[in-house]
């Protein structure tokens, strides 16, 4: 299982007809986190005319947006469309508008909010989150090089390695590849390996930075 989210919290600014559009975006894992981010952004930009938001959270399937006083469908919905077009989830974006004294019209608002949202997504970058099994392997030193090579071939990320009487290696392998990885390791070691499942969780894999 995989999903795409932003790689980091980021901000971008777009100016149109003297109005400033400041897009702030961050990864979230629950609706409470999204609401807290919206609230903190509103407090940071308390003097702005509008703080428009959109968020998509996997937990509970929450996907909501607000125009925050802008004409219907000209602000929150365009921001949401940018998030959906990028295939993102577990993400929250707030676009703050400082009115510049020139009316933009509905088309102008849609273009401005969309542009600011796209710039923020680009600044944040995206990453693929993979559902992985975190495994702990214990084996003799003689097998270490071949196991590391197998991990690379099968896309297993090495998280930690310690060397004592035996080698203890902790790695994360995508759940759908777990069986093939364990079989390959057992084959390399002739069965002389201990494999323990320590955790199952989503782990980031680089997408575009």
Image (cartoon, rainbow, N blue to C red):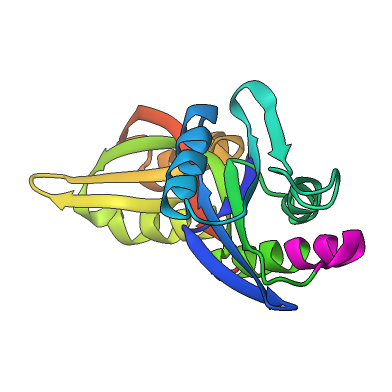
Q: Residue at x 52, y 37 (%)?
A: 34
Residue in the foreground of this view, choosing between 163 and 186: 163
Task: Check if residue 111 falls in the magenta segment.
Answer: yes
Residue in the foreground of this view, choosing between 125 and 18: 18
Residue with the most extreme front position: 101
Q: Residue at x 76, y 49 (%)?
A: 70
Q: Residue at x 45, y 36 (%)?
A: 36
Position of 77 with respect to 47 (left or right) is: right
Residue 155 seen in the figure = no
Residue with the most extreme left position: 164
Q: Above or below — where is 134 with respect to 23?
A: above
Q: Residue at x 56, y 70 (%)?
A: 12
* Residue 137 quadrant: top left
- What number of labels is visible? 0
In the picture, the quarter occupied by the N terminus is top right
Position of 66 with respect to 201 (left or right) is: right
Residue 160 seen in the figure = yes
Position of 92 with respect to 146 (left or right) is: right
Q: Above or below — where is 176 with respect to 74?
A: above
Q: Which residues are magenta?
A: 103-113
Residue 138 percent coordinates (x, y): 25, 39
Residue in the foreground of this view, choosing between 172 and 168: 172
Residue 101 percent coordinates (x, y): 71, 71
Residue 183 percent coordinates (x, y): 50, 37
Most prominent secondary structure in the magenta stretch? helix
* Residue 135 quadrant: top left
Residue 35 percent coordinates (x, y): 52, 34
Residue with the most extreme top position: 60
């Amino acid at each position: 299982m995989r999903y795409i989210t932003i790689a980091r919290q980021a901000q971008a600014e777009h100016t149109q007809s003297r109005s400033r559009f400041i897009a702030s975006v961050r990864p979230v894992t629950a609706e409470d986190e999204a609401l807290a981010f919206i609230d903190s952004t509103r407090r940071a930009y308390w003097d702005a005319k509008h703080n428009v938001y959109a968020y998509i959270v996997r937990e509970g399937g929450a996907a909501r947006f607000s125009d925050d006083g802008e004409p219907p469908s000209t602000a929150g919905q365009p921001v949401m469309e940018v998030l959906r077009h990028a295939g993102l989830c577990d993400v929250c974006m707030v676009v703050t508008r400082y009115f510049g004294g020139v009316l933009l019209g509905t088309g102008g608002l849609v273009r401005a909010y969309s542009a600011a949202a796209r710039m923020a997504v680009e600044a944040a970058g995206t990453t693929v989150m993979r559902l992985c099994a975190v495994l702990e392997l214990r084996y003799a030193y003689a097998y270490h090089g071949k196991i590391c090579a197998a991990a690379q071939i099968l896309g297993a990320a090495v998280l930690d390695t310690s060397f004592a009487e035996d080698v203890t290696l902790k790695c994360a392998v995508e759940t759908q590849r777990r069986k093939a990885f364990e079989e390959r390791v057992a084959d390399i070691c002739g069965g002389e390996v201990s494999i323990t499942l320590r955790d199952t969780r989503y782990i980031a894999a680089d997408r575009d930075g």
